[in-house]
Amino acid sequence: MARKKHEAPHEEHEGEPWLLPYSDLMTLLLALFIALFAISQTDQKKMAELSQAFSSAFNMGGPSFFNQMGPNVGRRAEMPSDEDKGNHAYLAENQQLEELQKKMQEYIEQNQLDEQLSTQLSEEGLMIRIKERALFPSGSAQLVGQAQSIIPVVAGLLGSVPERVVVSGHTDNVPINTAQFPSNWELSSTRAMNFMKALLASNPSMNPARFSAIGYSEYRPIADNKTDAGRQQNRRVEVFIARTYRFNPEEKSASASDTGADGMPTSGTTNNIPATAGSAGSSIAGTSY
């Protein structure tokens, strides 16, 4: 009689039972880290999206502990607002400069000085540009004529703001060689100095520490020196009111890359002073009061 074949007993694999708790552990760890990440955030919209996603994934539509979570009020309070970072100060300063520009423009229009005075507001500050013929005779640094009526107006505007002021003198490229002015460097510097002194004398309440004067000679032209009209535009005095604040919330004051040592905007930051050869040495002729 044939013997019955005995089937080999089923062997349990010792490694199988740990897979289930291991997968549960990994899932819980994943949920923990995501929960910690969500707690550290303050975006209410993202928190709501995370809450909905994890409610569906881990609770099968039931209530979730994510629903009890919200923005970390303590952490949010530690984060500086835009106002703390300087935006509020920037907007207030910008409004003040816009008002100054508006007042100056009204004066220009009322006195029909459009061809002699102009203003320009940029991210660096407010520029008041005055042509030579409104202030000086040709080849001279003596203030005459309309200067006596323009200076009190400009001084009154400058006295209403605390920003730094740079007065700069500019000439055309026609050489000058007199006993008083051996070159355009001396002429432009003396004109800037005299105009700045006149501003301070007109409004003694202004702090002289805010002011500086500098001569750029012929090296900061705004027009082509090859024509008479261009040379007339280049012979000028500029009063620059430098911004204290920038819109960048991380930076309250102008950086060295935005303005030069004299406080004027460097080439490339604004169109009101084009870059020209030789301008790097212009600060040698600068004069401070």
Image (cartoon, rainbow, N blue to C red):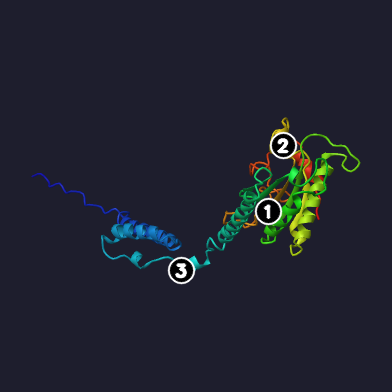
Front residue (pair 59, 286): 286
Furthest toward the left, the residue is: 1
Where residue 5 sits in the image (x, y, percent)?
15, 46
Mark 3 residue crowding within 10 angstroms, few (<14) / some (14–19) / many (20+): few
Asked whether, in this view, residue 269 is left or right of residue 146, the answer is left
Q: Residue at x 64, y 41 (%)?
A: 271
Mark 1 residue crowding within 10 angstroms, few (<14) / some (14–19) / many (20+): many
Front residue (pair 108, 220): 108
Name which of mark 1 and mark 3 comes first in the sequence.
3
Q: The disc labelled 1 sits on which kind of residue?
A: Ile
Which residue is the site of mark 2?
Answer: 276
Asked whether, in this view, residue 11 is left or right of residue 164, the answer is left
Q: The disc labelled 2 sits on which kind of residue?
A: Thr
Mark 2 residue crowding within 10 angstroms, few (<14) / some (14–19) / many (20+): few
Name the disc covering residue 73, or none.
3
Where residue 91 sits in the image (x, y, percent)?
56, 58
Real-space CA distance between mark 1 and mark 3, rounded to the nearest whole angstrom? 41 Å
Q: Name which quarter of the figure residue 115 lies in.
A: top right
Q: Nearer the viewer, mark 1 or mark 3?
A: 1
Q: Residue at x 26, y 54 (%)?
A: 12
Q: Name which quarter of the figure residue 28 lies in.
A: bottom left
Q: Residue at x 77, y 63 (%)?
A: 204
Asked whether, in this view, residue 38 is left or right of residue 151, the answer is left
- Image quadrant in which the N terminus is located: top left
Q: Name which quarter of the figure residue 43 lies in.
A: bottom left
Which residue is the site of mark 1?
Answer: 241
Q: The disc labelled 3 sits on which kind of residue?
A: Val
Asked whether, in this view, residue 180 is left or right of residue 77, the answer is right
Where residue 9 sits in the image (x, y, percent)?
21, 52
Name which of mark 3 and mark 2 comes first in the sequence.
3
For residue 29, say whether it is visible.
no
Q: Secondary structure at mark 1?
A: strand
